[in-house]
Amino acid sequence: MINTTEHLQWLKSCQANGVSLDLKELIYYRAKARLLDLTPKSHIKHKMAGQYLAPHKGRGMEFAEVRHYQPGDDIRSIDWRVTARTGQTHTKIYQEEKERPVFIFTDFSNTMLFGSQLLLKSVQAAHLSTFVAWSASERGDRVGGLVFNQNQHLELKPSSGGKAVLKLTHNLIINHQQALKIHGSDSEQNINCFSENLKRLNQLAKPGSLIYLISDFCHLGTEQQSNEALKQLQLLSRHCELVACHISDPFETHLPDHNGVIKVDTGNTQSSLPLMNNSFRKQFNNQAQQALNNRIQMLKKSGLHIFSFSSASPIEQQILGKA
């Protein structure tokens, strides 16, 4: 954890205010791209050439192994040294470099519009989304995304180069501005936005894609919403690699010791929290931690790789800590 002075210095360095989004603070992560390792954990199924190594047997870019010659093998790939040494014909096998589309699914729904220290969770989600996008672009991969708030969404089909990342950052800024405007307004709220956008992602992502899901996953807290969301996650996990980036704020699971009552505005309702009451704080913290543990278990059962991030410290410091 960094102190208040360091908070202010960091916000100034990346030209951020912690609440709204600006292009400069997202471009800041371009120089940090190499800190993030996007090496895939599973086989790549996409057919285009690129930077990831796929287990494709045939004439290609990278040497894989030497094995006994088999009928149909390309005679140009015969390894004459091994053949002479062993007295049996051997051939070189290559694996072709392949590109992997990287999708970034960014949640700006109402529960993400909260922050008690450095950033709103939604702003941290945007920072991490851009971090991933610049890293993928640096590797030469195509970047796509789906960003949504409580009522609206924007889609970006995978494309290559820095322009693709800039398109994503533009979508993040626009959708976040809309989210802040919607939050607390009298407009009707779509309680199924999370599962509906997962369904859109299922239609958008091609087999073999690497998908980063950046959210607090609070929509998994109700039975009806979690059932549909988990169904969509399980469908996605059959043909894509899923990485869940769970964003949280320290206040959500650990109420501070404070001599007074504070009011928390959730957008639709206001709650009073008697922080001077030790038993209330203990009960709140226990229940919140249990709810968090339940959401994490749901994600694990759906076959996701899970990483946790806090909105209370710079994302690059947390990435370095996980390296």
Image (cartoon, rainbow, N blue to C red):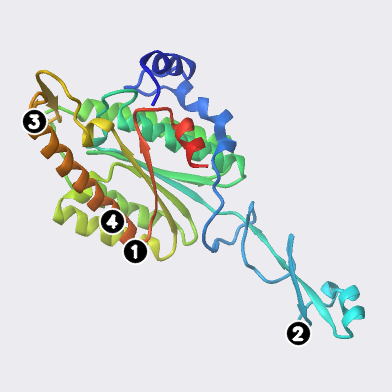
Which of the marked residues, 3 or 1, is nearer the chain's N terminus? 1
Judging by the rendered image, the residue that carries numbered circle 1 is 235
* C-alpha distance separating marks 3 and 4: 29 Å
Q: Residue 271, image x and y in percent?
A: 8, 29
Residue 168: tell me if it is visible: no
Q: Are marks 4 and 1 in contact (CB under 8 Å)?
A: no
* C-alpha distance separating marks 2 and 4: 47 Å
Label 3 environment density (alpha carbons within 10 Å; few <14, some 14–19, many ≥20)? few
Q: Are marks 3 and 4 in contact (CB under 8 Å)?
A: no
* C-alpha distance separating marks 4 and 1: 17 Å
Disc 3 secondary structure class:
loop
Q: Nearer the viewer, mark 4 or mark 1?
A: 4
Judging by the rendered image, the residue that carries numbered circle 3 is 269
Residue type for callout 4? Gln
Which of the marked residues, 2 or 3, is nearer the chain's N terminus? 2
Judging by the rendered image, the residue that carries numbered circle 2 is 70
Residue type for callout 2? Gln
Judging by the rendered image, the residue that carries numbered circle 4 is 297
Which of the marked residues, 2 or 4, is nearer the chain's N terminus? 2
- Left or right of 255? Residue 263 is left
Residue shown at the point (36%, 17%) measured from the top left: 17
